[in-house]
Image: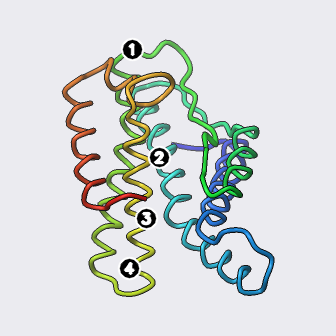
Amino acid sequence: MQFKKREQKDLLKSWLVISLAFALVIAGVGFTTTWLVALLTALAISLVTAGLGFVVHETAHKFIAEQENCHAEYRANNSMLIIALITSLFGIVIAAPGAVHVSGHPSPSQRGKTALAGPAANLILGILFLILSIALDGFWGRAAMFGSMINVWLGLFNMLPFGPFDGAKVFTWNKIVYGVTVGIAVILAFINGPL
C-alpha cells in the first residue's frame, strides 16, 4: 500500500485539524497562559487518540480496498475540516474530514469488506487503549481511557446502517457481520461509558 503525495498531504492535514478540533473541545476556549498549556496538552492527547483513530480508520479502508483489487485514494474534505474547527469552538466536533474513495465497480462484498475495515480498526484501537487505561495510572490512564472511548464511539457511529456511513455498506453485504460488529461496539461503549 502506498499513498500518493497528495494523499499524504490530505491525510496529514486532516489528522492535524481533527486533533486540534478535539483538543479545543477538551481544553475549551480561552486566551490565557494556563489555557494555552491545557490546549497543547489536549492536542498531544488528541493526536495519539482521536487523530490516530482517524488515520488508522482511513488507512484500513485503503488497505482492504487494495487487497480486494480496487483502486482507493484518500481525499480531504476542506469544507468539513473547517466545520469541525468551528463546531469545536462550541464544545462538539461535527466531522467528516475526508474519505477513501474507491473507484471502479466494486462488488457488494468488496464494498462491505472495505467499509468494515475502518470501524473494525477503531474498535481494535479502542480495545488497545482500554488495556492501556487499566495498566496506567493518573494522567496517562485517563488519556488512554479517552482514546478508548473516542475510538469505540467512532467505530459505533460509523456503523450506522444508512446514508454514506460504513454501516450501510456492511449491512448490505453481510447482516451477520454487521450485527456482530455492532454488538462488539455496543459492549465496548457500555464498558467505556459516555463520552
N-terminal label among 2 and 1: 2
Tell me, for residue 141, which label it has, or none.
Answer: 4
Q: Amino acid at mark 1?
A: Ser
Q: Amino acid at mark 2?
A: His
Q: Nearer the viewer, mark 2 or mark 3?
A: 3
**Residue highlighted by disc 2:** 57
Q: Nearer the viewer, mark 3 or mark 1?
A: 3
Dot 1: within a 10 Å radius of its alpha carbon, few (fewer than 14), some, or many (20 or more) residues? Answer: few
- x and y percent of residue 12 in the render? 67, 54
Q: CA distance from mark 4 to mark 3?
A: 10 Å
Pointers 2 and 4 in contact (C-beta within 8 Å): no
At x 26%, y 30%, the residue is 178
- Under tag 1, what secondary structure? loop
Pointers 3 and 1 in contact (C-beta within 8 Å): no
At x 68%, y 50%, the residue is 87
Relative depth, front residue between 88 and 146: 88
Tell me, for residue 147, which label it has, or none.
Answer: 3
Dot 2: within a 10 Å radius of its alpha carbon, few (fewer than 14), some, or many (20 or more) residues? Answer: many
**Residue highlighted by disc 1:** 107
